[in-house]
Image (cartoon, grey):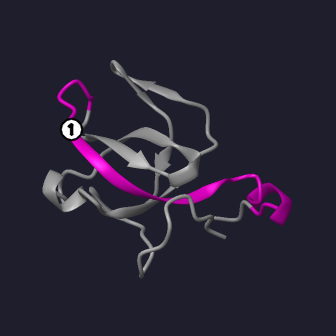
Amino acid sequence: MNNTISFEDFSKVDLRVGTVIKVNDFPEAKHLAYQLIIDFGGLGIRKSSAQITTLYSKQDLLNKQIIAVINFPKKQIAKFMSECLVLGAVYGKDVKLLNPENRVENGTPVS
């Protein structure tokens, strides 16, 4: 992979820490997924669809801090509007969520 971008390009991506406050099943999704409701502190509450059902139960996700891109355009997934992109490391069919090592304030920028 040799798609070099400038630091200026990277700085346009708004990465923030948020806490999952609600998790719902998402049976209408093409692939097994959850609907996540995430608190980004002063930036508000956002929704996301995440295909993370193989490694995480709904209970595992409640109150878990995650990292997400919050300045992508909204995306319609079935009848659900995803408002941010939760980040994870993909290996095989599994996604391992990225999260801060220690708890930080919701909305904290990631750089």
Tell me the quarter of the picture where residue 78 sits.
top left
Please indicate, yes or no, whether residue 89 appears anywhere in the rendered image. Answer: no
Residue at far top of view: 79
| Circle 1: element type | strand
- Look at the picture and state if 33 lies above or below 26: below
**Can residue 3 be seen in this snapshot?**
yes
Query: For residue 10: magenta?
Result: yes
Please, is residue 26 above or below residue 8 in the view?
above
Splitting the image into 4 quarters, where does residue 56 fall? bottom left
User: Is residue 62 positioned above or below 29 on the image?
Assistant: below
* Residue that label 1 marks: 24
Name which residue lies at 70% across and 65% down. 2
Q: Work out which quarter of the rendered image holds the N terminus and state it.
A: bottom right
Residue at 25% of width from left, 41% of height from top? 34
x and y percentages locating residue 64 in the rendered image: 31, 63
Q: Which residues are magenta?
A: 4-30
- Queried whether the magenta region covers residue 9, the answer comes back as yes
Residue extending farthest to the bottom is 101
Residue drawn at 72 percent across, 60 percent down: 3
Q: Horizontal and vertical percent for residue 109? A: 62, 64
Q: Is residue 75 left or right of residue 23?
A: right
Query: Between 107 and 3, which is closer to the camera in this rendering?
Result: 107
**Which quadrant: the C terminus?**
bottom right
Residue found at x 40% / y 47%: 38
Within-10-Å neighbours for mark 1: few <14, some 14–19, many 20+: few
| Residue type beneath disc 1 | Asn
Residue 21 image point, x, y percent: 30, 50
Provide residue 27's location: percent of width, then percent of height. Answer: 17, 28
